[in-house]
Image: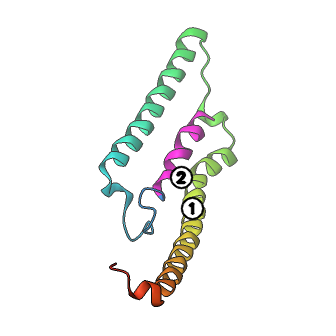
Amino acid sequence: MRHAISTAPVAVSVSLVHWQDHLWQKLPFRNIVWSITAGVIIVVQVVFSVLDVWARHTMWGAALSLADVHPAVWVLGCVWPFVVIALNELSKRREIKLALRAQKRARLDFDTKLGMNSPF
């Protein structure tokens, strides 16, 4: 559960780093601040999980074996970030189309008599 809580914001933010460009046009790793932040979040989550398993094993003598986790949970945990990224890219595609349409409409409205006399 904690893994999903920490990786979900990273998966969502992958497609929101460059909100005007698609993921395949401009990679999010070009943004240094995002790369460092996402890396730190994932590393802290891994360290916390390892320390949690170690503490449970040393204090109570029983640790959750990875074999005890149902395979559907593994599949869902590995596939879900990619589903989130795909859904975000689809919504971003629609937002980009709407923004282009609005920009064209504004340009068309600006080319009226009032807009022609404007210094811009």
The residue sitting at 62% across, 17% down in the picture is: 62
Left-right relation of 85 to 21: right
Q: Name above or below for residue 56 compared with residue 102.
A: above
Q: Quadrant of the N terminus?
A: top right
Is residue 118 highlighted in magenta? no
Q: Is residue 73 visible?
A: yes
Q: Quadrant of the C terminus?
A: bottom left
User: Which label sits on residue 11?
Assistant: none
User: Which is nearer the eye, 72 or 4?
Assistant: 4
Q: Looking at the picture, which amino acid does disc 2 mark?
A: Val
User: Which is nearer the eye, 101 or 26?
Assistant: 101
Rounded to the nearest angstrom, the CA distance separating label 1 from label 2 is 7 Å
Provide the residue span drawn in magenta. Answer: 1-14
Q: Name above or below for residue 31 compared with residue 87.
A: above
Q: Is residue 111 visible?
A: no
Q: Name above or below for residue 105 compared with residue 35.
A: below
Q: Looking at the picture, which amino acid does disc 1 mark?
A: Asn
Q: Which residue is identified by label 2?
A: 12
The residue sitting at 31% across, 57% down in the picture is: 30
User: Which label sits on residue 88?
Assistant: 1
